[in-house]
Amino acid sequence: MRAAWTVFRKELTDAVRDRRSWMVALVISMLSGPLLFTLMSSFIAGIEERAAAREVWLHEPERAPTLVNFLQRAGATVRTAPADYAEQLRAGRLHNAVLVPAADFEPLLAAGQSITVEVVFDDSHERAQPLVRASLDLLRAFNREAGVQRLLARGVSPQLLAAVEVEAQNLAPSQARGAQLLFIVPWVALLVAVFGALSVAIDVSSGERERGSLEPLLMNPVPVGELVLGKWGVVMVYSTVIVLLTMAGFLVSMRFISSETLAALMQLQWREVGIFCLVLLPFAGLMAAVNMLAATFGRSHKEAQTYVSYIAMAVQFAAIVPVFAPQRDAFWHLFAPSIGQLSVLMKTLRGEPLAAADLAVPALVCLAGMAACLLVQAALLRRESIVFARG
Amino acid sequence: MIEVEHLSKRFAGKNRKAAPVLAVADVSFTARNGRITALLGPNGAGKTTTLRIVTTLMQADGGTARVGGHDVAAAPAAVRAQLGVLSDARGLYARLTARENIAYFARLRGVPTADFERRLAELAALLDMADLLDRPTHGFSTGERMKVALARALIHDPSHLVLDEPTNGLDVMSTRALRRLLLALRAQDKCIVFSTHIMQEVEAVCDEIVIVARGRSIASGSAAALCAQAGTASLEDAFVTLALGHAETA
């Protein structure tokens, strides 16, 4: 192991002197938490603010004074929609639904006839959905009130219409309610583990080929496996530092988070961050080995970047599989790198208990994959086509 | 001593339809200790491939090569331990100083620190590179890079030295420094083999010349012996006569 230690020390010195690379990696890892959490909290705060305001937008509200009266009694603020409301909804400048009462709203209401109220909205904008829901709920409440009054006027008990009393009980733990949005937190953490030490992984593998130092290096009477192991060690140290800094950023951001709702929904404290590290570090080890292996095929930095970008893309796609999977947290997820990690991290954020297999299986899969990649890389470095083809 | 017998090496074509390329057809030579042996041949003659096989980085399709009695295919680690190699790839680590570049290889070869310091001082004096040692190698000239690469190849005091086109791109002063070093190493009874296509270099330092053309070793001996064999007055004429004569009959 003397050679592996020598290679490790040399590569670490070399990588530390590459200030531009590590400065970028450090800044990104330290900022990703605060940036992400600030964006999420401002997003949620915006929704909270609008929902709390209980605004209802009406086109030509003078057509339906009874509806306006009902809405005001229900505590909503009635706003007059601009004439170009459809345009503004599509552009995302207006988020709330616009209620368009029929021109003959009042006469029809008085005559006890059916009335049309168009509800115009564009729920392709994330922020719109809760606001639209609130407006529709208010409209349904008005419908119910008007209907009840008509039945009472005819001497019919309104209870006849309520065959079923609906009482909703949401069993999701309090943390889970924000979990859909929180998918982005483990996803960013995974990406940090993939991309954090990418430049170092490329430099220690294809960099040797590009600068013509691989051939002299391999002339030394040391096992190729030790050379590969020493190089992997440095990439791993980089990944570890970056993952830990990102987690520290998450923790600090949670302390200063502005949205109370988000703070209540997401339990990301010391325990959860500890689990994140346990899950992410073996994964970072695997990605270090995979990226080094892919970069070994590159004769230049640029070529290596092309190869590792395929891997990064695969990891990103794999990571979103659990979101669309028909069965949440299927056991096979644990065996698929990136899918398994995301599954376990999501579970952690949802506040669900973890089994020993949740931590052990993905870690063992990563260790096995990592060992396989390092062995293959050592074999590749004995190939003439790799040693002598330079960029 | 380096002994090469009937080496051959074939490379696959660039695609499936392309015919394989016979880079080395039949190369044999013996390089003795205390002598400088040159592989002299035009570009593409098979010199570099031969040296890559001798230095264990390539496997021959046929023939044998031994370095200090060790077969390159059977005991590559023992061969590497005895060899100092300056290949055509002389890449240095740009963010490390010259001293750190050399120390890295010394550590990989297990050279004790005290021996490293003594040896580095000797090489720095021989190669006139003391002022380069503590500078990062980024931006070094070709000559400066060659000096560092050569010191790196010699830091473990190898008994055998293989250099592939060592004077490529060097200025006069660097070439003279290299010659000085080779002569000093010969005096220490080292076995030195280098490949070149430059006649003056061969005449200036070599004891033994092996002419390689089209993948074959076609003649060997001292400069005078080759001139006598070709019936010419200069080594250059002898080379052209022997190499072209072979090319025409091949």
Image (cartoon, coloured by chain):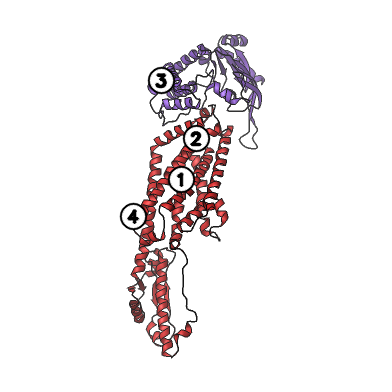
Chain colours: A red, B purple
Q: Which residue is mark 1?
A: A195
Tell me the residue at 47%/26% (across/down).
Answer: B107
Asked whether residue B114 is in view, the answer is: yes
Displayed quadrant of residue A127 = bottom left
Mark 3: which amino acid?
A: Met
Q: Secondary structure at mark 4?
A: loop
**B182 or A1, nearer to the observer:** A1
Mark 4: which amino acid?
A: Phe
Q: Which residue is mark 3?
A: B129
Q: Position of residue A141 (x, y in %)?
A: 41, 78
Q: CA distance from mark 3 to mark 2?
A: 30 Å
From the viewer's perspective, is the residue at label 3 or at label 2 nearer? 2
Q: CA distance from mark 4 to mark 2?
A: 40 Å
From the viewer's perspective, is the residue at label 1 or at label 2 nearer? 2
Give the chain of mark 3.
B
As displayed, is residue A166 above or below residue B208? below
Asked whether residue A301 is in view, the answer is: no
As displayed, is residue A253 above or below residue A25? below
From the viewer's perspective, is the residue at label 1 or at label 3 nearer? 1
Q: Which residue is mark 2?
A: A230
Label of residue A256 in the image: 4
Crowding at label 1, few (<14), some or many (≥20) Cα neighbours within 10 Å?
many
Q: Position of residue A145 (x, y in %)?
A: 40, 82
Mark 1: which amino acid?
A: Phe
Q: Secondary structure at mark 2?
A: helix
Count of numbered circles in the view: 4
* Labels 4, 1: one chain: yes
As displayed, is residue A229 above or below residue A92? above
Q: Are marks 1 and 2 in contact (CB under 8 Å)?
A: no
Q: Is residue A54 left or right of residue A356?
A: left
Q: CA distance from mark 4 to mark 3?
A: 57 Å
Say whether disc 4 or disc 2 marks the residue closer to the N-terminus. 2
